[in-house]
Image (cartoon, rainbow, N blue to C red):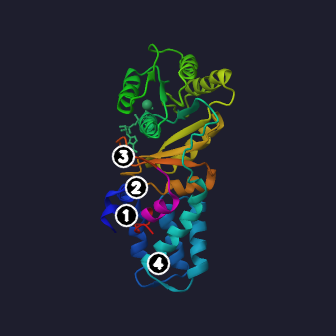
Amino acid sequence: MSDGEQTGWLGRLRRGLGKSSDKITGSIGSLFRGRKLDQAALDELEDALITSDIGVTTSAKLVNALAKSKFDKDVTDEEVREALADEMATVLDPVAQPLEIGDAHKPHVILVCGVNGSGKTTTIGKLANRFKSEGKSVMLVAGDTFRAAAVEQLQVWGERSNCPVVSGAHGADAAGLAYGALEQARAQNIDVVMIDTAGRLQNRKDLMAELEKVIRVIKKLDDSAPHTTLLVMDSTIGQNAHSQVETFKEMVNVSGLVMTKLDGSARGGVVIGLAEKFALPVHAVGVGEGIDDLRPFEARAFARALMGLPAA
Ligand SMILES: Nc1nc2c(ncn2[C@@H]2O[C@H](COP(=O)(O)OP(=O)(O)OP(=O)(O)O)[C@@H](O)[C@H]2O)c(=O)[nH]1
Ligand SMILES: [Mg+2]
């Protein structure tokens, strides 16, 4: 691995995925020490993938694909990892879609939802910084009006990225706040409006209703808004991610995912299962708490990092 790769984005991704990768490659390594890829080996490999949060269906698919090319052959641990990385990249490739902000809508409204602590506010801060560096004007809306710390946290990110933050009085109606902000953004010719929302537990019907109301109300100003509805997911939750996506999809028209906390998560494999099950675009991944720690999701780089392989 070159120095540039160590310190660059791929190096960070590799370090970030280190725990997930150690978990999977550790089991593959112990399975394939001078061994034929027979049925027993395939079964054990499938189990190892399932326990790495890749999911039952996807693990079976990956193992079947591997069996096609390598069954009954002597394989090394590295060959298995290379072949799996290729298969994973094939699953991930269709969902690896960077978040594009076109010129079609001004402002382009991004609604950001997800359960408590998933990384919504942090992701908004990181995205704001990215959009600003691309020369766009950005407005942030503190839609979590109940938690004072939530507003302050967004304000800190607003200062860091030099973006105005619209907030309301404590307990103010989030939908009304979003409506007012959108009016302001139009008057000021703002390019991108990002609406932060309160952490929504799946069983909190009132909070879900609030989210629906925000959408209903902003549609009164622009019936095509929100143009992007991001679901921010904490990747450390593993398989629970599936039920979270399902619940949010029922409530709002989720247009894409951001997977956070891939650094330090041992459960990064979940991204592969989600890709296969929901086929939702994965716009970006969070690999740290800093302003630059949000990266476009790259299928091949991710798959290889997860398999502990150097970038191809
Ligand atoms: N390591 C790491 N930490 C992250 C990442 N994204 C967010 N965090 C941290 O996760 C914690 C929660 O992030 P927030 O952005 O406050 O999450 P939230 O979804 O806005 O939370 P609520 O507003 O309480 O619902 C914070 O300590 C963040 O710094 C990431 O990609 N990696
Ligand atoms: Mg928040």
* First in sequence: mark 2 vs mark 4: 4
Asked whether the residues under the numbered discs 1 and 2 touch, taking CB atoms below 8 Å apart as contact, a structural biologist would say yes
Decide whether the magenta segment is chiefly helix, strand or loop. helix
Q: Is residue 200 above or below residue 97?
A: above
Q: Can you tell which mark lies on residue 266?
A: 2
**What type is the residue that disc 3 sits on?**
Gly
Asked whether the residues under the numbered discs 3 and 2 touch, taking CB atoms below 8 Å apart as contact, a structural biologist would say no
Tell me the mark number nearer the camera, choosing from 2 and 4: 4
Question: Looking at the image, which residue is at 56% across and 17% down?
Answer: 180
| The image quarter in which residue 273 lies | bottom right
The residue pinned by badge 1 equals 22
Residue 303: say if magenta: yes
Within-10-Å neighbours for mark 3: few <14, some 14–19, many 20+? some
The residue pinned by badge 4 equals 79
In which of the image's four quarters is ligand 1 placed?
Answer: top left
Task: Give the Cα distance between marks 2 and 4.
Answer: 23 Å
Within-10-Å neighbours for mark 2: few <14, some 14–19, many 20+? many
Question: Looking at the image, which residue is at 37% across and 44% down?
Answer: 292
Question: Looking at the image, which residue is at 33% across and 67% down?
Answer: 2
The residue pinned by badge 3 equals 288
Q: Which residues are magenta?
A: 296-305
**What type is the residue that disc 2 sits on?**
Ala
* First in sequence: mark 3 vs mark 4: 4
Task: Give the Cα distance between marks 3 and 4.
Answer: 31 Å
In terms of depth relative to the viewer, which is nearer, 274 or 183?
183
